[in-house]
Image: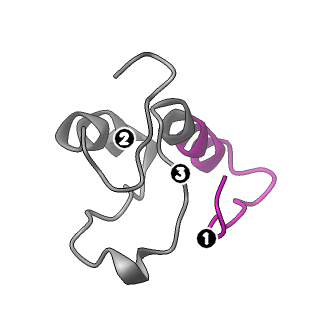
Amino acid sequence: MGRAFKVPKKGDAEQWAKVGALWFAGFRFLNHTRWRDAEPFPARLREVEDFVRRNPHHPFRTQGANGS
């Protein structure tokens, strides 16, 4: 996951779904200290799709499982 990963509460299904969506899109959870210009991860699950679309070359993104 990465060193900056903060575990959502056990019962917070939306946050776990958001984490999963970001992970499967190729994003890793790293410390933003060195990448101050990087767009922060979305706060809500409903924001993930647009975030992924806007950030094909985000510094925390690897090759996604879907080839994107």
Choose the circle earlier in sequence order: 2 or 1. Answer: 1
Q: Which mark is residue 29?
A: none
Which amino acid type is shown beneath numbered disc 3? Answer: Arg
**Residue hosting label 1:** 4
- Residue at 54% of width from left, 30% of height from top? 24
Q: Is residue 8 above or below residue 66?
A: below
- Which picture quadrant has residue 32? bottom left
Choose the circle earlier in sequence order: 3 or 1. Answer: 1
Dot 3, crowdedness within 10 Å: few (<14), some or many (≥20)?
Answer: some
Which amino acid type is shown beneath numbered disc 1? Answer: Ala
Q: Which mark is residue 48?
A: 2
Badge 3 vs badge 2, beta-carbon distance below 8 Å: no
Dot 2, crowdedness within 10 Å: few (<14), some or many (≥20)?
Answer: some
- Residue at 36% of width from left, 40% of height from top? 48
Magenta residues, as a range? Answer: 1-20
**Residue hosting label 3:** 28
Foreground residue, 16 or 61? 61
Residue 30 percent location from the top left of the image: 53, 65
Color encoding of the figure: one colour
Which amino acid type is shown beneath numbered disc 2? Answer: Val
Q: What is the distance, in whole Å, between disc 3 and disc 2 at their CAs?
A: 14 Å
